[in-house]
Amino acid sequence: MPLIDSLGESPTQNQIEKILQLTYSVWNSTVLDEVRNNSSNIDMLKKLLNNDFEGLAILEELISRKRTLFSNDLRLIGEYSLRKEDEEWRIRVEARDPFTI
């Protein structure tokens, strides 16, 4: 939510979906690294952001947020849908078991 809130009062669906893609990538990478007891997925994300210091700072904040607030939640995020209903954004998300991947 902090990233979506930073978009202002009237974010577009495209803006929200870009943030969701980023946050879901970080969430899933963090979960997979946790269950596999390594850091390969997070390392790959960091490598992609090599010299993007703002991007790396956002990445580190998202990793920290996941580990601090949701450390016991080891579900992966699968498919999702986003829609606006009565001026509110609604999201539906599929949870997946990381131990089956």
Image (tube, grey):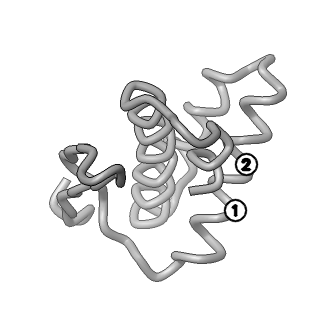
Residue 67, placed above or below residue 19:
below
Residue 28, placed above or below residue 37:
above
User: What type is the residue that disc 1 sits on?
Assistant: Ser
Identity of the residue furthest to the top in this view: 51
Q: Where is residue 85 shown, x and y percent of the image? A: 24, 51
Which secondary structure, mark 1? helix
Judge left or right: residue 93 versus residue 31.
left
Q: Where is residue 74 shown, x and y percent of the image? A: 37, 71
Mark 2 packing: few (<14 Cα in 10 Å), some, or many (20+)? Answer: some
Which secondary structure, mark 2? helix
Quadrant that contains the N terminus: bottom right
Q: Which residue is mark 1?
A: 64
Nearest the eye: 70 or 46: 70
Residue at 68% over, 23% down: 49
Residue at 72% over, 30% down: 55
Nearest the eye: 71 or 4: 4
Tag of residue 60: 2
Residue at 20% over, 66% down: 97
Specify the quadrant of the image occupied by residue 66.
bottom right
Between the residue at mark 1 and the residue at mark 2, the CA separation in whole angstroms equals 6 Å
Kindly indicate whether the residue at mark 2 contacts the one at mark 1 (C-beta within 8 angstroms). Answer: yes
Q: Where is residue 19 shown, x and y percent of the image? A: 50, 37
